[in-house]
Every structure is written in structure tokens, then in C-alpha cells.
Amino acid sequence: MMEVVLENAVEQNKAFSLIMLDIDYFKLYNDTYGHQAGDDCLTRVAQVLKQAVRTPDDVVSRYGGEEFVVILFNCPENVAQQVARRIQDGLRAAAIPHGASKVSEHVTVSMGIAGIAPGLAGPELIARADAALYRAKEAGRDRWSL
């Protein structure tokens, strides 16, 4: 579904940014609190993401496991960073306990941000956002990277 949305946006030559994010130490969360609590955590994180986007046209989608993707239409990377900040602030306000995390006592996320560039296809944008996500994790988690 998400790939189709991306390809349609690319074909229509729409400007957009993509945030790929991963819940930090989610396996430890599941191991500590159980899978039902893990499912509840995923639901709460999704709610924070939906509150952080700018318009109803922006798309929040679970990408698999503990990964989510946020597609921000008509949005340059600098504005996507503002959305990333709102996501972090929303998670801090939600204060979902995560006693097994190595970076915080609450649930945090690492994010990779990529903006569409001329000639860039949907899968390439996903790869750029994924690489940025990896850099955010390598830099200590609970942050974003471009």
C-alpha cells in the first residue's frame, strides 16, 4: 500500500518527504512487558504519529515489525524535521514506560528523513530514508538523521 502511494506521488511529480522510524529497543520491550503490551505500544506510537502530521493527506503506515513510515506531501526536508520534532515531543508527553531501553526510561524512536529529488523513484527514496534511519541508530538512537 505504502509503495503504491509513493509511486503515485513520484509519477505525479509531487514534492514530498518520507520519515522512516523504528521504535528503539522494541525487542527488549516485548521481552520485558510481553507481546500484548508490545501491541498496545505500537498502537500508542501510531496515535502519536497521526497527531504529529500536518494534514489529513499525510500518510502514516506501519512498515513492518516496529517500523513505521510517514509520508509528508508538499513538504521539504526542513519541514519534515519539524514533524520529527513533534513526534519526539509527542512520545515524551505519552511517556510510555520502557525500563529495558538503553537510551531512556520511556519509549523513543530513531528516524531517517529523505526528501524526493528529481528522478528518484519510490524504492530509492525508501532506501535513502532507511540509510538515514541506520545513521540515527548508529549515532545513539532517540534522534533523526537526513
Image (spheres, grey):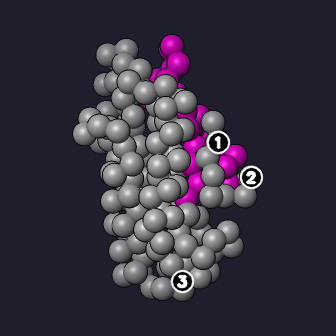
Residue 42: tell me if it is visible: no
| Amino acid at the residue labelled 2 | Ala
* Contact, mark 1 vs mark 3 (Cβ under 8 Å): no
Badge 1 is on which residue?
Answer: 145
Relative vertical location of residue 53 with respect to residue 104 in this rendering, above or below = above
* Contact, mark 1 vs mark 2 (Cβ under 8 Å): yes
Residue 13: tell me if it is visible: yes
Q: Is residue 124 magenta?
A: yes
Q: Quadrant of residue 45?
A: bottom left
| Amino acid at the residue labelled 3 | Asp
The stretch of residues the image draws in magenta is: 109-137
Task: State the separation of the CA atoms marked 1 and 2.
Answer: 9 Å
Farthest residue toward the left? 56
Please tell me which of labels 1 and 3 falls first in the chain.
Answer: 3
Please tell me which of labels 2 and 3 falls first in the chain.
Answer: 3
Front: mark 2 or 3: 2
| Amino acid at the residue labelled 1 | Ser
Badge 3 is on which residue?
Answer: 31
Q: Quadrant of residue 102?
A: bottom right
> The C terminus is located in which quarter?
top right
Disc ID at residue 23:
none
Secondary structure under tag 1 reads: strand
Mark 1 neighbour density, 10 Å: few (under 14) some (14–19) many (20 or more): many
Secondary structure under tag 2 reads: loop
Badge 2 is on which residue?
Answer: 139
Q: Quadrant of residue 2?
A: top left
Task: Please give the name of the residue rendered at 62% of the width and 58% of the height, measured from the top-left corner.
Answer: 142
The answer to whether residue 144 is left or right of residue 95 is right
Give the camera-side residue of 62 and 70: 70
* Spot occupied by residue 34 in the image (x, y as percentages of width and height): 45, 85
Mark 3 neighbour density, 10 Å: few (under 14) some (14–19) many (20 or more): few
> The N terminus is located in which quarter?
top left
